[in-house]
């Protein structure tokens, strides 16, 4: 739970109040000047109502240059950020031919597979030559009528088939993922967001109950809303409140009828992407076992990034994967690719393959992308004949803990837990969002700043993502720049650690 300082909360509310007041004044002025203008859509309801896109027009456009910055290089530890300019007060941004080399603290390239890799890249190129860039069809696509008949045949006879959207690499990938996460079977999709939003509605529907962490990702929220199930929320990462909600809901039953729930699914994340906090999985699993609720674990940010062999939060916290019913993850972070997966029992995965729209209708993950994931997993497990995977895992853990500790010593309010590569630095005030971002970019450090609606209105932050590809020199440079930007913007909300204490700690470490 984030406790915002009183004076900071007052100044933040005051800043948003000023922006809102001036924004409304500009809107009324525009209405007066536009009153005589002709409207070609006479009689039509406006697509974008004034109050609905007020935030975009009057707040977001002011700082639009801090978001969606294009790059012209691989998302490695250093990136080439394309320079942009605006002639209409940031309403539109135009790209230039110039770029700036910046230290990358914004990409999810946790293990450094997002750039050239001596083992992965040659194999990806080979698969590109053999299979092309796309399958140009879904996993079961073989012509519409043919697909329906094949599906009916497979359901009745339990026979599988390999249509045009499924290659040998896709089959190998699903086996590889299942083995890696410790589940009997897995299914992969071409988009991480769609893995949650398209699969949750297949798992549960009307008469079911979803209990979701209050800070779960939007993909989970969309999937839960689209399922038709009843949704209840428990306090972020609080097993005691989860148990209280489970007790109440089981006692009350379904709305109006009070019949028992058809099924209950508790949805949590391994690492929460905006907080950097690691899920209290052992306690949550214990509560779910007690009340016979299924556990759905989203490991988008934790798989590959934490744990001795990169197997995620289960390995880190000593949870048996058999106790987690549905394991979800994405390949866009630690594996340098795209897409997502669901791992579980063979019966569950077979059911999803016959019912999930992301599998039946969406274009399958490209073969080169699938090959990248397979190769990355082999490197992590040491199956490439080297210990580079172990070195990457050790480096990201060391980098993350070093960077977090140094930020805290400087007086920043840093969210999250040790070992997590995600480090949010609290900004709070809306004026500090562009100030911090622009000052870092001026010093050739690229950071991601996040505000409403991705976070609550008062809880704007800069989100730092650490990579195994960062050297110690990179991190020290970043710390100097962030410290300077923090002094200029006034976001060091805690007193810095005395230098004498730091020197003594360094001496003890050396001894």
Image: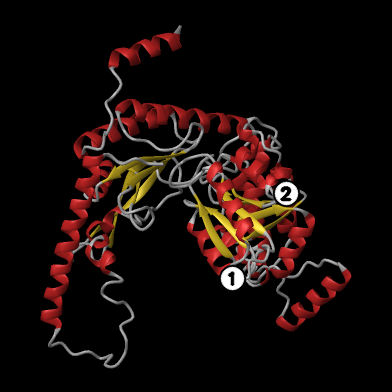
Q: Which of 309/289 is in front?
A: 289
From the viewer's perspective, tell me whether residue 342 is left or right of residue 499: right
User: Which of 331 and 80 lies nearest the eye of the viewer?
Assistant: 331
Residue 228 location (% of width, % of height): 58, 70
Q: Position of residue 99 (x, y in %)?
A: 31, 50
Q: Please report the residue visible at 80 percent of the width from the left and 80 percent of the height from the top.
A: 149
With respect to residue 502, does 272 lie above or below?
A: below
Provide the residue designation for mark 1. 256
Residue 268's tag is: none
- How many marks can you see? 2
Q: Quadrant of the N terminus?
A: top left
Relative to 374, 425 lies left or right: left
Residue at 29% in and 93% down: 43
Q: Is residue 299 visible?
A: no
The residue positioned 41% from the left and 30% from the top of the image is 403
Q: Is residue 50 above or below residue 98?
A: below
Residue 178 circle label: 2
Q: Quadrant of residue 379?
A: top right
* SS state under label 1: loop
Which mark sits nearer the N-terminus, 2 or 1?
2
Between 472 and 127, the one nearer to me in the picture: 472
Q: Tell me the SS state at disc 2.
A: helix
Q: In the drawing, does residue 199 fall left or right of residue 31? A: right
Q: CA distance from mark 2 to mark 1?
A: 41 Å
Residue 494 position within the rendered picture, expressed as x and y whole percent measured from the top left: 28, 30
Instruction: State whether residue 39 appears in this view.
Output: yes
What residue occupies the far top of the structure in this picture?
511
Q: Is residue 200 above or below residue 450?
A: below
Q: How far across and how far down the image is residue 205, in percent?
A: 64, 68
Residue at 25% in and 62% down:
61
Frontmost of labels 2 and 1 is 1
Q: In the image, is 473 to the left or to the right of 483?
A: right
């Amino acid at each position: 739970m984030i406790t915002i300082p009183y004076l900071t909360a007052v100044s933040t509310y005051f800043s948003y109040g000023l922006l809102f007041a001036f924004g409304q004044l500009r809107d009324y002025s525009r209405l007066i000047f536009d009153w005589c203008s002709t409207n070609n859509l006479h009689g039509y309801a406006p697509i974008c109502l004034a109050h609905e896109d007020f935030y975009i027009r009057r707040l977001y456009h002011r700082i639009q240059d801090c978001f969606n910055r294009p790059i012209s290089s691989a998302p490695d530890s250093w990136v080439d950020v394309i320079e942009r300019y605006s002639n209409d007060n940031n309403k539109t941004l135009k790209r230039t031919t110039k770029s700036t080399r910046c230290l990358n603290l914004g990409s999810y390239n946790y293990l450094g597979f997002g750039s050239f890799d001596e083992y992965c890249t040659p194999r990806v190129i080979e698969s590109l030559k053999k299979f092309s860039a796309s399958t140009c069809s879904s996993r079961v696509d073989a012509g519409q009528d043919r697909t329906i008949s094949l599906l009916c045949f497979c359901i009745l006879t339990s026979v599988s088939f390999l249509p045009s959207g499924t290659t040998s690499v896709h089959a190998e990938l699903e086996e590889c993922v299942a083995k890696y996460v410790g589940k009997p079977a897995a299914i992969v999709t071409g988009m991480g967001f769609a893995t949650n939003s398209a699969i949750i509605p297949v798992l549960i529907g009307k008469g079911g109950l979803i209990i979701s962490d209050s800070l779960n990702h939007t993909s989970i929220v969309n999937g839960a809303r689209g399922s038709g199930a009843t949704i209840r929320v428990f306090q972020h990462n609080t097993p005691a409140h989860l148990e209280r909600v489970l007790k109440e809901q089981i006692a009350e039953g379904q709305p109006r009828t009070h019949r028992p729930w058809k099924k209950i699914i508790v949805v949590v994340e391994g690492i929460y992407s905006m907080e950097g906090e690691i899920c209290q999985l052992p306690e949550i699993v214990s509560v779910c076992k007690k009340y016979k609720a299924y556990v759905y674990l989203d490991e988008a940010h934790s798989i590959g990034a934490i744990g001795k062999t990169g197997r995620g939060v289960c390995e880190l916290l000593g949870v048996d994967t058999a106790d987690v019913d549905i394991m979800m993850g994405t390949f866009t972070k630690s594996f340098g690719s795209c897409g997502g997966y669901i791992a579980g029992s063979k019966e569950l995965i077979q059911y999803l393959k016959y019912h999930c729209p992301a599998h039946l209708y969406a274009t399958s993950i490209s073969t080169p992308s699938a090959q990248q994931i397979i190769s990355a997993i082999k490197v992590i497990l040491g199956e490439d004949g080297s210990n580079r995977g172990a070195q990457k895992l050790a480096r990201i853990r060391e980098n993350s803990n070093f960077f977090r500790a140094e930020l805290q010593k400087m007086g920043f309010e840093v969210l999250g837990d040790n070992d997590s590569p995600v480090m949010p630095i609290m900004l709070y005030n809306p004026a500090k969002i562009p100030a911090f971002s622009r000052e870092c970019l001026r010093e050739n450090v690229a950071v991601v700043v996040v505000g409403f609606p991705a976070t609550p209105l008062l809880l704007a932050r800069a989100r730092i993502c650490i990579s195994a590809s960062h050297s110690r020199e990179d991190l020290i440079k970043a710390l100097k720049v962030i410290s300077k930007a923090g002094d200029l913007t006034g976001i060091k909300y805690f007193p810095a650690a005395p230098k004498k204490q730091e020197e003594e700690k360094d001496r003890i470490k050396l001894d």
